[in-house]
Image: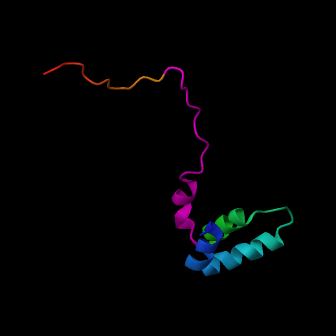
Amino acid sequence: MKLALWRAVLDPVTSLRAVFIQRRSTTPLSYDTAWRQARMHRHPDDMPYRLHGHQPQPPTDTTDHQPVNPPSTEVT
């Protein structure tokens, strides 16, 4: 099931507000962005959830990848 459909089913008021925000926007605005704006307007306490997972990932260096705790080589 698509994310937009889940949002419409679980929170129809926010979804309708998102459509209105998207249509009233003078610049091209995605539904996802409009939905987040509508959600933050109605539920500002959700800001930590909005910020979680939407940060750029730090670059990973795969050339020098060694385990932090190497396994023991002792034979018992």
Instruction: Give 46 or 18, whichever is nearer the viewer.
Output: 18
The mark total stands at 0
- Which quadrant would residue 44 be assigned to in this image? bottom right
Instruction: Give 75 or 12, whichever is nearer the viewer.
Output: 75
> In the image, 2: left or right of 64?
right
SS majority, magenta: loop
In the displayed structure, 57 sits above or below 75; it is below
Q: Magenta stretch?
A: 43-64
- Which quadrant would residue 19 be assigned to in this image? bottom right
Where's the N terminus, which quadrant? bottom right
- Which quadrant would residue 68 be assigned to in this image? top left
Q: Image point 66% across, 70% down: which residue?
A: 38
What is the x, y in percent for residue 29? 79, 63
Q: Most extreme residue toward the left, as rendered?
A: 76
What is the x, y in percent for residue 14? 64, 76
What is the x, y in percent for residue 15? 66, 76
Q: Image point 56% across, 70% down: which residue?
A: 43
Q: Most extreme residue toward the front, as rendered?
A: 75
What is the x, y in percent for residue 75? 17, 20
Where's the C terminus, which quadrant? top left
Q: Image point 56% across, 31% down: which residue?
A: 60
Instruction: Give 21 or 62, whichever is nearer the viewer.
Output: 62
In the displayed structure, 52 sits above or below 62; it is below
Q: Image point 71% across, 73% down: which residue?
A: 18
In the displayed structure, 73 sits above or below 13; it is above
In the displayed structure, 11 sits above or below 70; it is below
Q: Is residue 52 magenta?
A: yes
